[in-house]
Image (cartoon, rainbow, N blue to C red):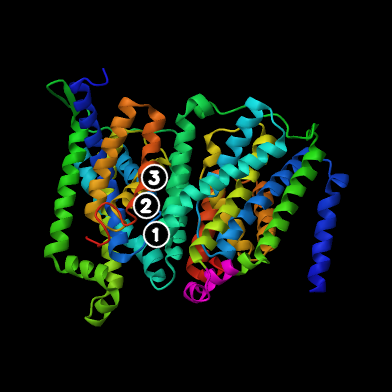
Amino acid sequence: MATDPVFLAQLAANGLSVGLGYALAAIGLALIFGIVGQVNFAHGELYMLGAFLLYWATQRLGLPYGAAGVLVVLAMGGVGALLAQIVIVPNLQRSFESVVLGTLAVGIILQNAVRLIFGATPLDVSSPFEQLSFDLGGVLVFGQRLLVGAAFVAAFAGLSALLRYTEMGRAMRATAQNPDACLMVGIDTRRVTRWTTALSAALIGLAAVVICPLFDLYPNMGTDVVIKSFAVVIIGGMGNVWGAALAGIALGLAESYAGGLGNATMRDAIAFVLMIAMLLARPHGLLGRTVRV
Amino acid sequence: MSARQAAGGVALAIALTLPLFVKSPYILHIAIVTGIYMVLVQSLNIVLGYCGLLSLASPAFFGMGAYVATLLALKLGWDSGVTLALAAFAGIVTAVVIGFPSLRVSRHAFVIVTLAATLLLQLVALNWEDVTRGSLGLPDIPAPRFFGVAVTSRIAWYYFSAAAALGALAATWLLVSSRIGRAMVAVRDNEQLALACGIDAFRTRLFAFCFSAALGAIAGGIYAHFITYIDPGVFGFSVTETLLIMVILGGPGTLLGPLAGAVIFTALPEILRLAPEMRSLIYGVILLAVVLYHPRRVFA
C-alpha cells in the first residue's frame, strides 16, 4: 500500500494543495518582514478575523461567497492600514521587540473580542466549491483546494507585478534595500509601511476566504496558521517572499508524506524539525541571504 | 533602603505565617498558585529583564517540565527530587534546541522560533497519544514525594510552594550578582560594547535562556503535581500573556518587582471574578498601552 504509485500521487496532490495554502498564508508575513523589517505577531489573528468577517458577510448579511470574499479582502486591507497606523508606524524607530509585543497584544485583543462576540462554538462557512471534486486517474482533487491554488497563483502574480511595475512597489523595494536612502530621495517610509501592512493583511484575508471553508471557525484558529506561517518564513529565509512560497509548498509536501507514510506525530513534528535544521544548515533560508521581495 | 527592608521583612513574615490565620482552602489554593507563578516570573525576568531578550517560550518549558515530571512519577514512581531535576534537564535541552540555532541568526529569528516551537510542542503533545494520551490528558498525578515524605495537605503544599518561590528568588539573585549575570546586563544595555569587552553575547544569551528554562520546567513539574491533572493546554499561550503582564508591569530587571506582579495579577482576576476571555482582553489592552505609551518600561 505504502509504495502504491496512485497512493504516492494522492499524497503529492494533497501535499501540494495544503502547501499552496501555507504559501498563501505566509507570503504576507514575509512581505512585512522583507520590506519594513518588522514581525507581525497578529498575523494569525488577522487570518481568524478574515474568516469571521466572511462568516458574518455570508451568514448574517446573506451575501454570496464571491462578493463576500471581495468585501473581506478589501476590509482586511483597511484593518492592516489601521494596524500599521496604531502599532507599527509609531514604533519604527524603536527596537523591533516593541512591534512584536504591540502586535502580540493586538492579537490577544482580537482573539478574545471575537470569543466574547461569537462564542467558542465552532462555526462553519460554506462555499460553492466545496462539493466539487475531480478524479484524475485515481487521484482525487477537491474544488476548494483548487481554488486555494488559484488564489495563490493570482496573489503571487499580482504581488510580483505590483512590486515591479507600480510606483508604490518600487518604493517598497527601495525601503527593503535601504530605508535611510529612501528618506534622502523623498520616499515616505511611513506611507510605505502603511501600504505594506495593508497589502499583507489583504493577502491573509484572501487566504482566510479561500482556506477557511475547509475547516471549522473558532476564535483561536489563527494559532494553527501562525505556527505554519512562522515555520515557513524561517525555512524560506526571513523576509524572502519567493522563499516563503517555495518553503510553504515544500512543507505541505513533507507533511503529507510524513503523515501518509508515518503517523500524525511525525506530520506535526516535521515543521519543527525542518525549521531547526534549516537554521543550523542554512541560517538565511532556502534562497540565501539576499532579501528578494 | 531601610524602609524597603522593613517592607520586605513584613511581606516575608506575612508569607511565612499565612496558613496560621488563613484557613480558607480557596485562598490557600490561590496562594500556592501564586508561589508557582513566582518561580515562573523569575524565569521570564532573567531572559527579558536581565538579558533584554524577548522569549515567548515560557509555556514550552512549563509544559515540558509538567509532562516529564508527570510521566516519570506515573510510570516509574521515582522520588520527586529526581523527577523535578530531570524536568529541569528536559527544559534545558528544549532551550538548547530552540536557542542554539536561532540565537546565532538574529533576535528576530529567536522570537519567531520561540513562539513557533512552543505551539508545535503543543501540537505534538496533542497528537502523540501513545505517550501523552492526547487531549484526554494525564489524570491522577500523585503527590510529590521527597525521601519518602509526601506533600499532601494544603498547608504542606503552601510551604512547598513558598520554598520553591524563595529558591527561585535565591537562584536568580545568585545568577544576576555573578559575573555571568553582569555579562547579561552588559549584553542587554550595549551589545557592541559588551562584545568589545570580550563578552561572548551568544553564549551569555544561551546560558540565560537555559537557566530560565530550568526554572520554568521546575514550575511546570510542581504545577502538575499540585493540580494532579495535565493536558496539552499546559503548553497554552495564556501563560506567556500572564507572565509578560506580571514581569513588564512589575518591573523587568528587578528582583522583587516581578514577584509583586505575580501576587497582584494572580489575586486581581480572582477578586474581580473575571471570565478568562475578559481577563485576556484586558491584559491585551494593558500590554498594548504599555508598548505605545511607556515603551521604555518593556526593557529595563
Q: Which residues are magenta?
A: B183-199
Q: Nearer the viewer, mark 3 or mark 2?
A: 2
Q: Amino acid at mark 1?
A: Val
Q: Amino acid at mark 2?
A: Leu
Dot 3: element: helix
**Residue B27: % across, % down:** 76, 43
Instruction: Identify the subunit bearing mark 1.
Output: B
Per the rendering, the mark at residue B105 is 1
- Which residue is tagged 3? A227
Determine if marks 1 and 3 fall on one subunit: no
Q: Amino acid at mark 3?
A: Ile
- Label 1, label 2: how far apart the Cα atoms are: 8 Å
Q: Is residue A115 left or right of residue A50?
A: right
Looking at the image, which residue sits at the far right? Answer: B20
Q: Residue at x 28, y 38 (%)?
A: A252
- Label 3, label 2: how far apart the Cα atoms are: 16 Å
Q: Residue at x 65, y 64 (%)?
A: B176
Dot 3, how many residues are within 10 Å of its Cα: few (below 14), some (14-19), or many (20+)? many
- Which residue is tagged 2? A279
* Res B161 quadrant in image: top right
Identify whether B200 is placed above or below A263: below
Identify whether B208 is placed above or below B216: below
Kindly indicate whether the residue at mark 2 contacts the one at mark 1 (C-beta within 8 angstroms): yes
Query: Toward the viewer: B206 or B267?
Result: B206
Q: Quadrant of the N terminus of chain A?
A: top left
Kindly indicate whether the residue at mark 2 contacts the one at mark 3 (C-beta within 8 angstroms): no
**Residue A138: % across, % down:** 15, 20
Q: Is residue A14 left or right of residue B57?
A: left
Kindly indicate whether the residue at mark 3 contacts the one at mark 1 (C-beta within 8 angstroms): no
